[in-house]
Image: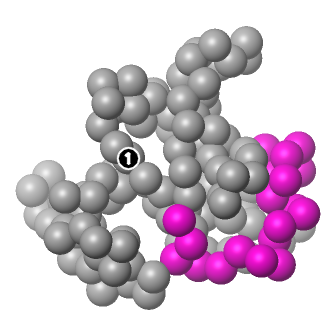
Amino acid sequence: MNGKLKTLAAVVLSMSAWGSPLSWGAEAVIVVQRSPLAGFRHYEAAAVWRDMKAGDRLALVREPENPYDPNAVRVEWRGRKLGYLPRRDNGAVARQLDRGNRLQGRIVRLTRHRDPWKRIEFEVFLGL
Protein backbone atom coordinates (compact mmCIF):
# COMPACT_ATOMS: atom_id res chain seq x y z
CA MET A 1 0.00 0.00 0.00
CA ASN A 2 1.49 3.39 -0.95
CA GLY A 3 1.82 6.33 1.47
CA LYS A 4 -1.34 8.13 0.32
CA LEU A 5 -3.46 5.01 0.69
CA LYS A 6 -2.02 4.32 4.15
CA THR A 7 -2.92 7.86 5.24
CA LEU A 8 -6.42 7.52 3.78
CA ALA A 9 -6.83 4.15 5.50
CA ALA A 10 -5.77 5.68 8.83
CA VAL A 11 -8.28 8.51 8.39
CA VAL A 12 -11.08 6.09 7.53
CA LEU A 13 -10.21 3.80 10.45
CA SER A 14 -10.29 6.73 12.84
CA MET A 15 -13.56 7.96 11.41
CA SER A 16 -15.24 4.64 12.11
CA ALA A 17 -13.57 3.75 15.42
CA TRP A 18 -15.45 3.84 18.72
CA GLY A 19 -14.74 7.10 20.53
CA SER A 20 -13.65 8.72 17.29
CA PRO A 21 -11.91 12.09 17.44
CA LEU A 22 -14.41 13.16 14.79
CA SER A 23 -16.99 13.29 17.54
CA TRP A 24 -14.68 15.86 19.19
CA GLY A 25 -15.30 18.33 16.37
CA ALA A 26 -12.65 17.40 13.79
CA GLU A 27 -13.78 16.99 10.18
CA ALA A 28 -11.08 14.39 9.57
CA VAL A 29 -8.03 13.04 11.34
CA ILE A 30 -4.63 11.82 10.30
CA VAL A 31 -3.30 9.09 12.55
CA VAL A 32 0.41 9.73 13.02
CA GLN A 33 1.21 6.59 15.00
CA ARG A 34 0.05 3.99 17.52
CA SER A 35 2.23 3.31 20.53
CA PRO A 36 2.31 1.55 23.87
CA LEU A 37 2.63 3.75 26.93
CA ALA A 38 6.12 3.89 28.43
CA GLY A 39 6.41 4.27 32.21
CA PHE A 40 3.10 2.71 33.27
CA ARG A 41 4.55 1.53 36.60
CA HIS A 42 6.33 4.78 37.42
CA TYR A 43 3.55 7.36 37.16
CA GLU A 44 -0.23 7.55 37.72
CA ALA A 45 -1.55 5.10 35.11
CA ALA A 46 -2.08 2.28 37.60
CA ALA A 47 -3.93 4.60 40.00
CA VAL A 48 -6.47 5.73 37.37
CA TRP A 49 -6.64 2.47 35.37
CA ARG A 50 -10.24 1.68 36.39
CA ASP A 51 -11.48 5.12 35.33
CA MET A 52 -9.97 5.13 31.83
CA LYS A 53 -11.67 3.71 28.76
CA ALA A 54 -10.93 3.26 25.08
CA GLY A 55 -11.63 6.46 23.19
CA ASP A 56 -10.60 8.79 26.03
CA ARG A 57 -8.56 11.84 25.06
CA LEU A 58 -4.93 12.12 26.02
CA ALA A 59 -2.81 15.26 26.16
CA LEU A 60 0.67 15.17 24.66
CA VAL A 61 3.08 17.53 26.41
CA ARG A 62 6.63 18.23 25.26
CA GLU A 63 9.42 18.09 27.82
CA PRO A 64 12.44 19.46 25.93
CA GLU A 65 14.36 19.92 29.19
CA ASN A 66 13.87 16.29 30.26
CA PRO A 67 17.30 15.14 31.53
CA TYR A 68 16.85 11.60 30.14
CA ASP A 69 15.48 12.36 26.67
CA PRO A 70 15.48 15.70 24.81
CA ASN A 71 12.59 14.43 22.64
CA ALA A 72 10.43 13.44 25.61
CA VAL A 73 6.66 13.65 25.12
CA ARG A 74 4.62 13.22 28.29
CA VAL A 75 1.19 11.55 28.07
CA GLU A 76 -1.57 12.84 30.36
CA TRP A 77 -5.16 11.79 31.00
CA ARG A 78 -7.37 14.42 32.66
CA GLY A 79 -4.29 16.21 33.98
CA ARG A 80 -2.74 13.03 35.41
CA LYS A 81 0.69 11.97 34.17
CA LEU A 82 0.39 8.44 32.79
CA GLY A 83 3.85 8.08 31.29
CA TYR A 84 5.60 8.87 28.02
CA LEU A 85 5.62 8.20 24.33
CA PRO A 86 8.32 5.52 23.94
CA ARG A 87 11.77 6.97 23.21
CA ARG A 88 12.09 4.95 20.00
CA ASP A 89 8.85 6.52 18.68
CA ASN A 90 9.00 10.11 19.93
CA GLY A 91 11.32 12.01 17.56
CA ALA A 92 8.83 12.89 14.83
CA VAL A 93 6.06 13.70 17.32
CA ALA A 94 8.42 15.92 19.34
CA ARG A 95 9.42 17.84 16.19
CA GLN A 96 5.79 18.38 15.20
CA LEU A 97 4.86 19.60 18.68
CA ASP A 98 7.88 21.93 18.66
CA ARG A 99 6.64 23.38 15.35
CA GLY A 100 3.29 24.16 16.95
CA ASN A 101 1.26 21.39 15.38
CA ARG A 102 -1.58 20.42 17.68
CA LEU A 103 -1.19 16.67 17.90
CA GLN A 104 -3.54 14.87 20.25
CA GLY A 105 -3.84 11.40 21.65
CA ARG A 106 -6.55 8.93 22.51
CA ILE A 107 -6.65 5.55 24.16
CA VAL A 108 -7.15 2.77 21.62
CA ARG A 109 -6.95 -0.26 23.89
CA LEU A 110 -6.65 -1.11 27.58
CA THR A 111 -5.46 -4.64 28.28
CA ARG A 112 -4.92 -6.41 31.60
CA HIS A 113 -1.47 -7.90 31.08
CA ARG A 114 1.57 -8.76 33.19
CA ASP A 115 3.77 -6.74 30.84
CA PRO A 116 3.17 -3.02 31.55
CA TRP A 117 4.17 -2.20 27.96
CA LYS A 118 1.04 -4.00 26.76
CA ARG A 119 -1.50 -2.38 29.10
CA ILE A 120 -2.24 0.90 27.29
CA GLU A 121 -2.11 1.41 23.55
CA PHE A 122 -2.81 4.88 22.22
CA GLU A 123 -2.94 6.83 18.98
CA VAL A 124 -1.30 10.12 18.17
CA PHE A 125 -3.33 12.05 15.61
CA LEU A 126 -3.79 15.42 13.97
CA GLY A 127 -7.35 16.72 13.74
CA LEU A 128 -8.22 18.60 10.54
Residue underneath mark 1: 103
Q: Is residue 23 left or right of residue 128?
A: right
Q: Is residue 50 magenta?
A: yes
Q: Nearer the viewer, residue 48 or 36?
A: 48
Q: Is residue 52 left or right of residue 28?
A: right
Q: Residue at x 85, y 46 (%)?
A: 43
**13 relative to 34, above or below:** below
Image spot of residue 34 (x, y percent)? 47, 57
Q: Amino acid at mark 1?
A: Leu
Secondary structure beneath dot 1 equals: strand
Image spot of residue 32 (x, y percent)? 34, 51
The image quadrant that residue 15 belongs to is: bottom left
Q: Is residue 96 left or right of residue 109?
A: left
**10 relative to 38, above or below:** below
In the rendered image, is residue 93 in sight? Answer: yes
Q: Quadrant of the C terminus?
A: bottom left
Q: Is residue 93 magenta?
A: no
Image spot of residue 12 (x, y percent)? 21, 77
**112 relative to 61, above or below:** below
Q: Residue at x 60, y 64 (%)?
A: 121
Q: Residue at x 54, y 22 (%)?
A: 71
Q: Which residues are magenta?
A: 39-57
Q: Quadrant of the N terminus?
A: bottom left
Q: Nearer the viewer, residue 114 or 121?
A: 121
The image quadrant that residue 87 belongs to is: top right
Q: Residue at x 88, y 62 (%)?
A: 46
Image spot of residue 29 (x, y percent)? 25, 63
Q: Is residue 30 left or right of residue 124?
A: left
Q: Total marks drawn?
A: 1
Question: Which scheme is used to colour this image of the protein?
Answer: one colour
Q: Residues within 10 Å of mark 1 (few under 14, many from 20)?
A: some
